[in-house]
Amino acid sequence: MILADKIVNLRKKAGWSQEELAEKMGVSRQSISKWEGAQSVPDMNRILKLSEVFHVSTDYLLRDDMEELPCTVNLLEEAEPIENDKGEALIKVSLETANEYLEHCKKSSISIAAGVMLCILSPILLIYLSVAGEMKKIPLTEDQGAMAGLIVMFCIVASAVVIFIINGHKGAPYQFLEKEPLDTEYGIDGMVRDKMKKYEKSHIMEFSMGVVLCIISCVPIFLVQLFYGDDDFLTVMAVGILLMLVSIGVFFIVRTSIIWDGYQVLLEEGDYTRIAKQREKSIGNIYWPIVTAVYLFVSFITMKWGITWVIWPVAGILYSVVAVIYGNYCVGKGK
């Protein structure tokens, strides 16, 4: 493999454009383009700089017989844990794995956010058809309208679940990044912080837009009550608009949060610090078995399986509260 091809491959593995590489090298984009097109060859000083930027040896860059990079760690099953000064087992993460994970977060953020959006939108037709049938605005009875709405709702929710399962399967190889202490290769921290800084403005704007849409979503209901009083049909239409606004707002929040969390995972910041990961394991190993036991006990006693599923979303919300309380307790104890 010639030098030109190696520069192209290394740049793409790092997730950089020609402009970004040119900025790091202190040259023009045209120079990078000529190097990659084998129209010119960088001098020895540039070769040394390339080896520093890409974290490879000059031998690899200059020797055409060296086709492959020295072996690097990609996924968890290939990684051998190492220990830091505190005796913690750390999982080695390569630059290639870091870029693959960030790309996965970027791609999955849209589909997962769309799945959540579908779940929020799913009951709209059920509500509309039920009320429209009751008020004789459609050639269906209330029960028929409700049944048709339920069928549509379950189909939409099923589609969303398929999206979640597919994304969960694609993200499985990267789960260790969110759960295990990491030892990232040299250069990953700077690369991630650079991408994070560039995305920060978009993240704030998108997150803020989502929150604003959720807040103003109740305005249609207030307007109907203000100008039309207790008009049931218009109120139902307003509820539909409310759910649409909420779904769009949540789409923005979920999408940008997944991308932002991807940066925090690699930097081990926010909810993904090593202390937070350890607390997550400590709480999760106790909390979820208890929730499962309560769910099964209540379900078998009442035999109302169609209702007791509510325990799971409630438990999910309470888990965040328990995690915060436990975290404050640990801080107070100096753990």
Image (tube, rainbow, N blue to C red):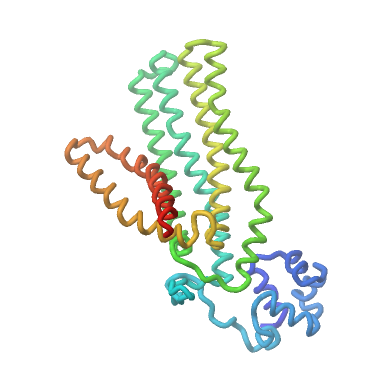
**Picture quarter containing residue 190?**
bottom right
Residue furthest to the left in view is: 301
Residue furthest to the front in view is: 333
Q: How many marks?
A: 0
Residue 294: x %, y % from top left: 24, 44
Give me the residue at 40% from left, 42% from top: 317
Work out whether residue 114 or residue 134 is closer to the camera in this orientation and state it. 114
Residue 257 sits above or below residue 175 on the image: above
Residue 110: x %, y % from top left: 55, 48
Give me the residue at 62% from left, 87% from top: 66
Give me the residue at 75% from left, 82% from top: 47
Q: Could you tell whether 109 is left or right of 24 in the image?
A: left
Residue 207: x %, y % from top left: 60, 42
Residue 1 sits above or below residue 134 on the image: below
Residue 82: x %, y % from top left: 46, 77
Residue 86 sits above or below residue 107 on the image: below
Q: Could you tell whether 102 is left or right of 129 in the image?
A: right
Q: Could you tell whether 97 is left or right of 144 in the image?
A: right
Give me the residue at 47% from left, 39% from top: 118
On the rendered image, what quadrant is the N terminus found in? bottom right
**Picture quarter containing residue 89?**
bottom left
On the rendered image, what quadrant is the C terminus found in? bottom left
